[in-house]
Image: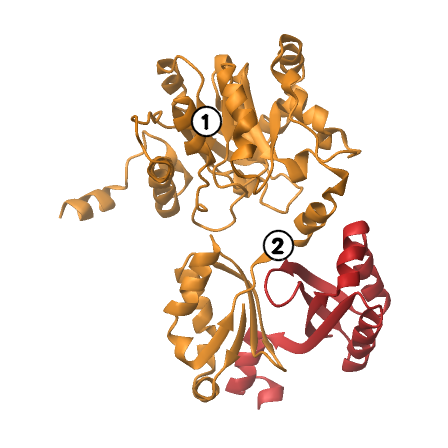
Chain colours: A orange, B red
Amino acid sequence: MLMRYHSEGYKAIMEQPERVREIHEALIRWESKILQSYHMLGGWDQCTIFEAPDNFKAYRATLAQEFGTTAETEILPTIDMDLFARLISQEAGTVGPHEWQISLWAKLTRLAWRHHAYGQWVKPYCKPLTITGREKFSTIDGPCIVVANHTSHMDALVLHSALPERRRWNIYAGAAADRWFIRGRKELVMQPWYQSLAMGTFPIQRGGGSKALDYPKWLLDKGCNVIIFPEGTRSTSRSMAKFRHGVSLLALAKNVPVVPVFLTGLRKLRPKGSKEIIPGPAGAHILDPIYFEAGTEVPDATRQIYEALNTVHKRVNEFGDEAANPDWQPPAAEVSAAAS
Amino acid sequence: MATYIMMSTLTDEGRKTLKERPERLKAVNKEVEAMGARVMSQYAVLGGYDFINIIEAPSNEVMSRLSMELGSRGTIKVTTFPAMDIDAFVDMLKGTTPSGS
C-alpha cells in the first residue's frame, strides 16, 4: 500500500510521529499482518507491505483508519514473485488430470509407495499426531468431499494419514496446476505423473471457473472421495481466508456430504515459504459431516462449511491448538466468567 | 547501506521478453547484485506498477546507475524512491537518533 499525506497529515505526524503507525493498527484490526513498512522521499510518503485475508479487508482497513482524512492511499495487490514466474512460464503447459489414477494398478502402486509419498513426512515430524473423529466417516455410505484449513505443505500429508483406510484407498486431492502439474519438471516429486500416481492428486487451474470442477465431478461420479482446500492457497494470517465456492458447487451438484477437518500445528512445522520441517505436535480433528438440504444456495453452503471450521479456528486462536480437540474444556476461569 | 523502493512498469517489449524468457526475472536480480546493490524483496503487483522492489544500495550514485542501466534496455520504466524503515523514521522525528537530534 502506498500512502501520500495531505498537509494535515504532515502536521499531525510532526506533532505525534507515532501516528505514522496508525495505518498499521488499522490493518491489524482487519486481520492483516505487517511485513515491511518504509517512509519514502518522492511522489509517495509511505510504503507498507502486508498480508491480508483478501483485497476487500485491506481496502476496508484504509477506510476505517483514523488517518484516512489526512492521507490518500493506493492498494496494489501483490503476487509472490515465484508464483508470478511460474504463472508467466506456463506456455510450457500443465499436464493432467490423469484418469488412470483411479485404476486398480494405480491404487496398489500408491499403497506400496505410501511410506515414500506420505509416511516419511508425517511420522518423524508430527510428534505427537493427534487424530480425533475418525468414526465420523462410518455414517457415510458413498463418496464425500473432505475439506480442511490450509497453512502448510504438510496439510495434505497429515490429512491423508488421518483418514480411515477405506477412504484413503480411494481419495484424490486437488492441487494447484501451476505448481504441481507443470510439464517438464525434473524433480521426482514435482513431476505430474508422480503427483497423480503416488500422491493421488489432480490439477486444479487457479481461476479456471466451473470447468476446473469437471474432473472432481467425474471422480465423485466414479465413487471416489475428493479432498479440496477451500481457501485455495495456504493462509498466512491469523484468520482463515475466504472460502471459494468450488466445494459447495461440487457437493450440491453431486449430492454428497462435506467432511470438515481442522488441522493444527502444521504452520509451525513447515510455514509457507520454508523448506525446512521442524518436528512438533500436530492434529487432525474430523468434524461432523455436513449434508446439504435440497435447494441450498451455493453461498449458504459455503458459509456452512466455513462456519464449521471457523468455530474451531476461533477456539484455537484464543486457547491454543489443544482447543481443537472435541474433548477440550475451557479453563475453569473462563467457564465461571461466562456463567456470571 | 541505504534503502530504496523501485517501482517498475514493463514496456510492451518487456512484456514480450518476460513471456518468452521468464527466467529473466531472476537474472535481473543477479545483475543488480553485480552492480553493488541487493534486492531485499520483490513483488509483482496489480495496479499502476508491475513490480515493487525493495533494494539496498550503498549510495544514490549506485542507485542512479542501476536505474539508468535497467531503464536503458527499453523493457521497463523505473521510478526510484529513497526510503527508510518506518521505525527509524519515527525515531528521527522524535529526535532520538543522531539524524533527528
The image quarter in which residue A63 lies: bottom left
Residue at x 56%, y 33% (from the top left corner): A212
Give the camera-side residue of A337 and B46: B46
Relative side of A306 to A195, left or right: left
Q: Is residue A84 visible?
A: yes
**Dot placed on the residue nearer the N-terminal end, 2 or 1:** 2
Residue kind at label 1, given as amino acid type = Val
In the rendered structure, find residue A97 and report the number of the disc placed on it.
none
Relative side of B27 to A58, left or right: right
Give the camera-side residue of B10 and A303: B10
Q: Residue A134 placed where, x, y %?
A: 41, 20
Circle 1: element type: strand
Q: Chain of mark 2?
A: A
Give the camera-side residue of A25 and A144: A144
Residue at x 72%, y 42% (from the top left corner): A90
Residue at x 82%, y 56% (from the top left corner): B27
Residue at x 68%, y 33% (from the top left corner): A181
> Residue tagged by mark 2?
A79
Q: Residue A141 placed where, x, y %?
A: 39, 12
Q: CA distance from mark 2 to mark 1?
A: 28 Å
Q: Is residue B22 visible?
A: no
Q: Residue A51 placed where, x, y %?
A: 52, 57
Q: Chain of mark 1?
A: A
> Residue tagged by mark 1?
A146
The image quarter in which residue A122 lies: top right
